[in-house]
């Protein structure tokens, strides 16, 4: 099995012209999934999972202003690619929470499988990649089932960039995550 996890970046709104970062992350995974299909000759081995919620204040509940979660928006965007196995579980907000819940979701699905190995593809941009890799390393050690299955992680770089302000925020978050992982503050 091949699991594809696009991480949210911005809300997709065709009227306002927003969502280019999120769409770039989804498109990078769809492109990678097509390569997998060329190797395996089946669409059925590819499952897309997104857990990005509605808002930071209310990740698991829609609001009058935000009726669609980021996960639902991403799955709608991916739906045009021909991949029919998509799981939108909008309850998380933030990189760590999105990854943790996506990994838990795929482990729930995988327990019923007769296969003994699987691949996980995660898409984000180059500036976000170090923190995503650190989260995956930490989560893999935290969840014993992941150690049992020993999945292969593949990190796919999407073609969108951060603003200078976002680069500063990402650097701060990287050190904050490192502190949390080292001192078990999570």
Image: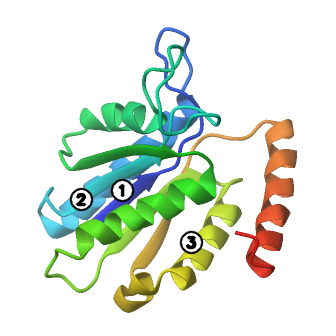
User: Measuring 16% from the left and 68% from the top, which residue is drawn there?
Assistant: 40
Quadrant location of residue 121?
bottom left
Quadrant location of residue 68?
top left
Whole-Å distance between the Cαs marked 3 and 1? Answer: 19 Å
User: Measuring 74% from the left and 75% from the top, which residue is drawn there?
Assistant: 181
Mark with earlier residue (3, 1): 1
Q: Dot 2: what SS? A: strand
Mark with earlier residue (3, 2): 2
Q: Examine the rendering and report whether any part of residue 1 can be seen.
A: no
Mark with earlier residue (2, 1): 1
Q: Which residue is mark 3?
A: 136
**Percent x, y of residue 16:** 55, 11
Q: Is residue 14 above or below residue 41?
A: above
> Badge 2: few (under 14), some or many (20 or more) residues near its Cα, within 10 Å?
many
> Badge 3: few (under 14), some or many (20 or more) residues near its Cα, within 10 Å?
some
Q: Which residue is mark 2?
A: 46
Q: Is residue 121 above or below residue 164?
A: below
**Percent x, y of residue 176:** 83, 62
Q: Which residue is mark 1?
A: 32
Between 83 and 145, which is closer to the camera in this rendering?
A: 145
């Amino acid at each position: 099995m091949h699991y594809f996890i696009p991480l949210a970046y911005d809300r997709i709104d065709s009227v306002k012209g927003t969502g280019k970062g999120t769409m770039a992350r989804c498109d990078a995974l769809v492109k990678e999934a097509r390569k997998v299909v060329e190797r395996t000759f089946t669409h059925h081995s590819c499952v897309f999972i997104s857990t990005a919620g509605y808002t930071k204040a209310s990740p698991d509940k829609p609001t009058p202003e935000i009726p669609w979660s980021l996960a639902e928006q991403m799955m709608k965007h991916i739906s045009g690619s021909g991949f029919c196995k998509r799981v939108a579980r909008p309850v998380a907000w933030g990189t760590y929470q999105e990854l943790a819940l996506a990994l838990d979701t795929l482990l729930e699905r995988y327990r019923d499988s007769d296969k003994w190995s699987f691949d996980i593809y995660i898409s984000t941009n180059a500036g976000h990649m170090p923190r995503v890799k650190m989260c995956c390393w930490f989560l893999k050690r935290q969840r014993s089932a992941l150690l049992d299955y020993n999945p292969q992680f593949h990190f796919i770089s999407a073609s969108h960039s951060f603003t200078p302000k976002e680069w500063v925020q990402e650097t701060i978050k990287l050190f904050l995550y490192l502190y949390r992982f080292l001192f078990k503050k999570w």
